Image: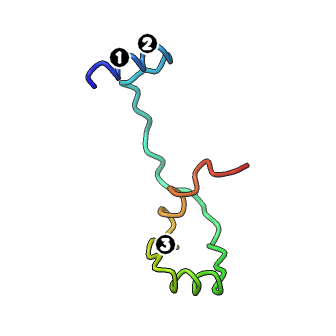
Amino acid sequence: MPAFGPWVAANTGTDLNYNDDTQPDMEVDAPNVNTDFIDELGTQNISRRSFLKWDRVIHSHGHTY
């Protein structure tokens, strides 16, 4: 797919060399833990869950109505 990058740049006006500085930190509310729900997840073989700040930020970014 060597032509994909140039196609994206040409058709979307995107600068593929753009680099934004990393955000050093941000304030995040404490997780709202529903223990009954978490307990139910534990019985359904769903092991991927995290209450760590950056995991929560990464997985929730843009997920709003």
Whole-percent x, y for residue 62 in the image: 61, 47
- Tell me, yes or no, whether the two marked residues, 3 and 2, touch with CB atoms within 8 Å: no
Q: Tell whether 33 sits left or right of 54.
A: right
Neighbour tally class for label 2: few under 14, some 14-19, many 20 plus, Cα within 10 Å: few
Q: Could you say which disc has been placed on residue 50 in the image?
A: 3
Q: Could you say which disc has been placed on residue 10 in the image?
A: 2
Under mark 3, the amino acid is Ser
Measure how far apart labels 2 and 1 are at the Cα level.
Answer: 6 Å
Whole-percent x, y for residue 22 in the image: 43, 45
Nearer to us in this view, 40 or 31: 40
Work out whether mark 1 precedes mark 3 in sequence or the reverse, and give the earlier one: 1
Residue at the image position 49 percent from the left and 72 percent from the top: 50
Image quarter of the N terminus: top left
Residue at the image position 48 percent from the left and 62 percent from the top: 54
Q: Could you say which disc has been placed on residue 36 in the image?
A: none
- Tell me, yes or no, whether the two marked residues, 2 and 1, touch with CB atoms within 8 Å: yes
In the rendered view, would you say 36 is above or below 17? below
Name the secondary structure under disc 3: loop
